[in-house]
């Protein structure tokens, strides 16, 4: 796996006359080596030259836990790792750096290599990482089906009387129990808190009549899950049912619009136009979706202005929402993967509104 | 709080003729505004000019959850945020950027502002953030005492027959139950796995005779906890007791060496020389400690070569260890804060080796 992916990177480096690629914190590194660096001040960095063997520089105390086919070069506690890494990079020309590498690392390397122009590696890595192979799709599918089980189980639980934070803990525990190795987020947003799409679970107590947005996901075999379902306690709030019917239709049509050859923005338009026609256009305040893989959010972004062609093997969320300030919010989210003749939904739990206690 | 800290930054910017400071992902932003940005592709950035008001650029959908005294400037889903942020920065001179900001963000700004020299903001922020005020020390103290309770509770549990991963889950649950808002790490490393200081909990089953390194911490009111204690199942492995006596002595002397006016490396030397004298020098393969605050690891680093003067209000870990490959590892870790006449330990659970079932 590593060999093939690194070879693909080297082909692109050669085509674009880029001397080397540098991957550190973020997902380019696990994509190329199977190893994810901890986001800490001791730099871990993979240097992929245009030609020749890649080297993985790691802090000495991390070295024992690195299992990769790439050559590992540990550096000690009193070494300057930037001098070491700079010595493995070209002295002139272009070097591409992983998008999430810390700025302090980049600045340290820029100071040591004034003849290098550093560019964002995303234009090299995204085209490769966007197209998932069979193993990657299998991991995304398993993760998706696992969170579907969580969504179903939530429908059997009592929400009323619990705080958002308590419900969020329950969601996290269920995600881990479902086989995920970690929880990425567990948003529980009740009543008017639901009108803030990225609301953090608070001490607000959930009450009858609340609409509750539950948006959660984690990582399974390194790959992300991400789904959003709506739960209402005993009854729906005023004005909710009409909007929910519009949202469900918009999400469904948007998913059905996915096929090879369409564009990212066309999928966004499919959802957005139905919500606008329903009279809620001003309340759909975010893009329709985002790619998913080793990163919770990655290319392709399903947003106006993104003319990216949709291709077989891409995986992304479709998650339109309607947010009425001071009243309630709603969102329905599935991850889909593009197939030869359309789309496979990786989330299959019921998208119908669930009434809970 | 924000006003005073931003004013302190502006004083340093003026003294060093730096045009502005830019803070994004990482802890400079919550230090200056009380708001922590999610590490996602939509940039959140605080611009602190040398003179005048600071602006916080946030993705529109995050805006509802931002509570800060600083002026908030939301940007919409189809805006180019880098054009917007560049327009708020000077066009020539120096701009300091937060250490953990993504490289892709820095490169996007470098392309738009070719006349600016970007430098690492750590030299500005670390001297401010290293000296904790009363509220920060109170948060660190509460977090420390909470994990002490977890360490004690662990001593009452059965380790034998459980996997490292199961024990790690138990540790995480206890950290959350103790009042932390999140878990940063829960290392459980049994037997020879303990010889890798940053071992990830695995499916290895813990057995009688295993020495188990348990190193855990989280965030409480934004501030970190971090402690390591040793548990042995039923009995200690061969050669362990002698080394543990050396380690306990080294950790204790190192803590006692902390006082205003000493240096970071002198504290490292205090631990290192005792371990070397005990015959285990080659097995102490990492620095003695790291600062702690809004970041799990931050300045001052307690390491050879760091001549940083230790001052009242600094908080850091003291965590020497001994790691014998293929046999076992051990580490004892407390967080301390520097006081007028020495040091306050923020971890007070017993450092004695605990025998467990």
Image: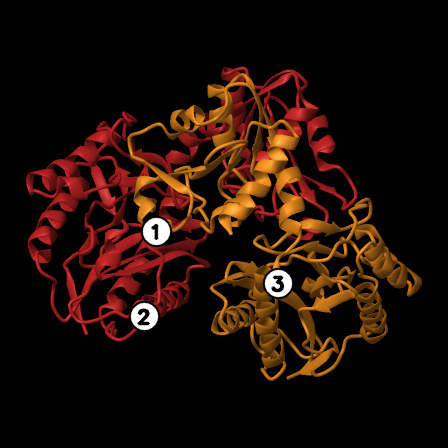
Chain colours: A red, B orange
Residue A321 vs B205, above or below: the answer is above
Task: Give the distance between the C-alpha atoms of the residues marked 2 and 1, in whole angstroms.
Answer: 18 Å
Q: Quadrant of residue A185?
A: bottom left
The residue nearer to you, when weighing B70 against B159, is: B70
Crowd class of label 2 (few under 14; some 14 to 19; many from 20; radius 10 Å): many
Q: Quadrant of the C terminus of chain A?
A: bottom left
Have a look at marks 2 and 1 and say if they share a chain. Answer: no
In this view, the mark in front (2 or 3): 3
Task: Give coordinates of residue B133: x percent, y percent.
Answer: 61, 57
Disc on res. B137: 3
Check disc 2 and report its element: helix, strand or loop.
Answer: loop
Q: Give me the chain letter of mark 2.
A: A
Query: Left or right of B91: which side holds B327?
Result: right
Task: Give the distance between the C-alpha atoms of the residues marked 3 and 1, in whole angstroms.
Answer: 26 Å
Looking at the image, tell me whether mark 3 or mark 1 is earlier in sequence order. Answer: 1
Residue at x 54% of width, y 16% of height: B115
Task: Give coordinates of residue A38: x percent, y percent.
Answer: 58, 49
The residue nearer to you, when weighing A78 against B64, is: B64
Question: In this figure, which residue is indicated by the disc labeled 2?
Answer: A163
Disc on res. A137: none
In this view, the mark in front (3 or 1): 3
Q: Give me the chain letter of mark 3.
A: B
Check disc 1 and report its element: helix, strand or loop.
Answer: helix
Query: Left or right of B315: which side holds A191?
Result: left
Have a look at marks 2 and 3 and say if they share a chain. Answer: no
Crowd class of label 1 (few under 14; some 14 to 19; many from 20; radius 10 Å): some
């Amino acid at each position: 796996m590593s060999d093939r992916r690194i070879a693909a990177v080297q082909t692109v480096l050669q085509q674009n006359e880029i001397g080397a690629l540098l991957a550190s914190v973020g997902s380019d590194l696990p994509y190329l080596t199977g190893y994810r660096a901890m986001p800490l001040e001791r730099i871990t960095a993979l240097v992929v030259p245009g030609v020749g063997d890649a080297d993985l520089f790691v802090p000495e105390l991390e070295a024992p836990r690195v299992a990769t086919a790439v050559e590992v070069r540990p550096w000690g506690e009193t070494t300057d790792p930037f001098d070491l890494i700079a010595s493995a990079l070209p002295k002139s020309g272009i070097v591409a750096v992983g998008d999430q590498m810390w700025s302090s690392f980049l600045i340290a390397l820029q100071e040591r290599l004034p003849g290098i122009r550093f560019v964002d590696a995303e234009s090299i890595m995204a085209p490769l990482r966007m197209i998932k192979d069979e193993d990657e799709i299998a991991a995304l599918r398993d993760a998706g089906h696992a969170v579907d089980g969580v969504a179903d189980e939530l429908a059997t639980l009592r929400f009323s009387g619990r705080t958002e934070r308590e419900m969020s803990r329950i969601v996290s525990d269920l995600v881990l129990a479902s086989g995920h190795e970690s929880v990425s987020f567990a948003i529980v947003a009740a009543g008017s808190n639901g009108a803030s799409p990225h609301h953090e679970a608070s001490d607000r107590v959930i009450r009858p009549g609340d609409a509750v947005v539950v948006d959660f996901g984690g990582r399974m075999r390194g790959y992300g899950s991400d789904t959003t379902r709506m739960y209402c306690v005993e009854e729906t709030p005023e004005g909710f049912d009409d909007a929910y019917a519009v949202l469900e239709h918009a999400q469904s049509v948007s998913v059905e619009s996915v096929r090879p050859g369409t564009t990212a923005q066309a999928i966004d338009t499919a959802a957005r136009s139905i919500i606008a026609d329903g009279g809620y256009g001003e309340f759909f305040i975010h893009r329709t979706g985002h790619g998913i893989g080793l990163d919770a959010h990655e290319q392709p972004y399903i947003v106006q202005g993104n003319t990216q062609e949709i291709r077989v093997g891409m995986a992304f969320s479709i998650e339109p929402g309607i947010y009425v300030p001071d009243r309630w919010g709603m969102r329905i989210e599935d991850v889909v993967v593009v197939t030869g003749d359309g789309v496979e939904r990786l989330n299959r739990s019921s998208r119908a509104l669930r009434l809970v206690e």
